């Protein structure tokens, strides 16, 4: 096992999962898991298992029902062994903090450099930019560590022509996918909505490794509290988590802030607020939940990325309710 180049490590256990069903109950093995620049090492008993990063085909498959662990309690890793056979294992950690760090570092390493096609800006302020064109480029992720051991990431795309595209991941409020025509082919691309210098942008990215980029964005935004992570089974059965609940007044305040209404004009814009004290109490609660942040004294606030993400989710749910047949 390598002694240098270690990105993350943890004590835990792992189990192989039968991809095609059947078989007996899973047998867990105690292990020491180490993540390096080149791959994962699992040491169990007197044995060692090496999983090169290049052999990993996917991260995050939902195997909860197979191993009797919640979706956030393990990392599922699919990879090709030396014979080209696909293997799937679940890796759990003794410490939840170490598991999260291991998972985030793994998806970061998988996505940190790839060839892409980029459409930027695809949208500005929600308006589609018809004069933008797809360009080839290289995507990288720059990670900045803090003295406290935390980190912030920035996606940097360098197109063959034109200016470098910089996307601070902490300012991303929504990611998704949509069909787009690139050249003569229709592709499923990743859509990234984010705020930069008080303007909202939409950037579209396509790559043969788009799955790795989506895994990274999902994990990062989930860990930062900006986006909710859901297991594949929950999403496919229509049981998606609708997120935190708000009163009617709180919803109206969030949407008003999202729409650009000044917090100092909120009393006259939203009906039902019983004076300045009640409004400041609501702002205090939203600040504690990470939805808004203070930009000046006397509670002048603006939405955070998490807050904007919540409003996006509320708007989607309202559209779904209005178009429902039931």
Image (cartoon, helix red, strand yellow):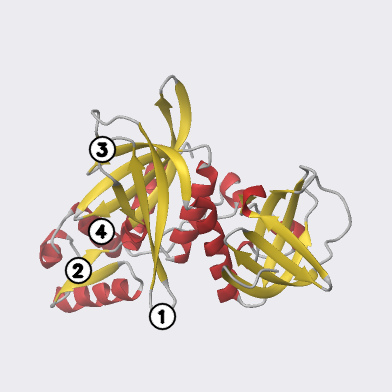
Q: How many marks?
A: 4
Q: Nearer the viewer, residue 283 or 21?
A: 21
> How far apart are labels 2 and 3 at the CA level?
35 Å
Label located before the other in sequence (4 or 1): 1
Local crowd size for mark 3, using a 10 Å CA cut-off: few (<14), some (14–19), many (≥20): few
- CA gap between label 4 and label 1 equals 37 Å
Q: CA distance from mark 4 to mark 3?
A: 40 Å
The Cα–Cα distance between marks 2 and 4, rounded to whole angstroms, is 15 Å
Q: Which residue is mark 2?
A: 301
The residue wearing badge 1 is 148
- Which one is earlier in the sequence, the residue at label 2 or at label 4? 4
Would residue 231 be found to the left or right of residue 192 on screen? right
Query: 320 or 162, which is in the foreground?
Result: 162
Q: Which residue is mark 4?
A: 252
Q: The residue tagged with tag 4: helix, strand or loop?
A: helix
Q: CA gap, disc 1 to disc 3?
A: 36 Å
Name the disc covering residue 285, or none.
none
What element does badge 1 sit on?
loop
For marks 2 and 4, give the one nearer the viewer. Answer: 2
**Residue 35's spot in the image, x, y percent?**
61, 65
């Amino acid at each position: 096992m390598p002694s240098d180049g270690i990105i993350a490590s943890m004590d835990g256990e792992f189990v192989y999962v039968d991809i095609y069903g059947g078989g007996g109950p899973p047998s867990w093995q105690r292990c020491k898991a180490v993540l390096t620049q080149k791959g994962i090492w699992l040491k169990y008993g007197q044995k060692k298992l090496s999983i090169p990063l290049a052999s990993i085909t996917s991260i995050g498959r939902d195997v909860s029902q197979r191993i009797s662990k919640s979706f956030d309690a393990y990392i599922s890793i699919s990879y090709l062994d030396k014979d080209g056979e696909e293997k799937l294992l679940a890796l759990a950690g003794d410490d939840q903090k170490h598991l999260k760090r291991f998972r985030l570092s793994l998806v970061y390493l998988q996505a940190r450099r790839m060839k892409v096609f980029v459409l930027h800006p695809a949208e500005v302020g929600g308006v589609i930019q018809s004069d933008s064109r797809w360009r080839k480029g290289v995507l990288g992720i720059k990670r900045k560590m803090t003295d406290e051991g935390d980190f912030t990431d920035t996606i940097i795309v360098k197109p063959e022509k034109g200016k470098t595209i910089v996307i601070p991941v902490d300012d991303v409020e929504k990611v998704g996918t949509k069909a787009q025509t690139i050249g003569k082919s229709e592709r499923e691309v990743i859509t990234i909505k984010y705020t930069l210098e008080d303007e909202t942008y939409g950037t579209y990215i396509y790559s043969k490794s788009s799955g790795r980029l989506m895994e990274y964005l999902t994990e990062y935004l989930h860990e930062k509290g900006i986006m909710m992570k859901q297991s594949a089974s929950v999403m496919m059965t229509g049981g998606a988590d609708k997120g935190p609940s708000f009163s009617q007044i709180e919803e109206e305040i969030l949407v008003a802030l999202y729409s650009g209404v000044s917090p100092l004009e909120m009393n006259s814009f939203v009906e039902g607020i019983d004076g300045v004290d009640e409004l400041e109490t609501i702002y205090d609660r939203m600040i504690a939940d990470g939805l808004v942040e203070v930009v000046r004294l006397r509670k002048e606030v603006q939405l955070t990325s998490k807050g904007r993400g919540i409003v996006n989710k509320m708007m989607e749910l309202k559209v779904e309710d209005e178009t429902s047949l039931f």
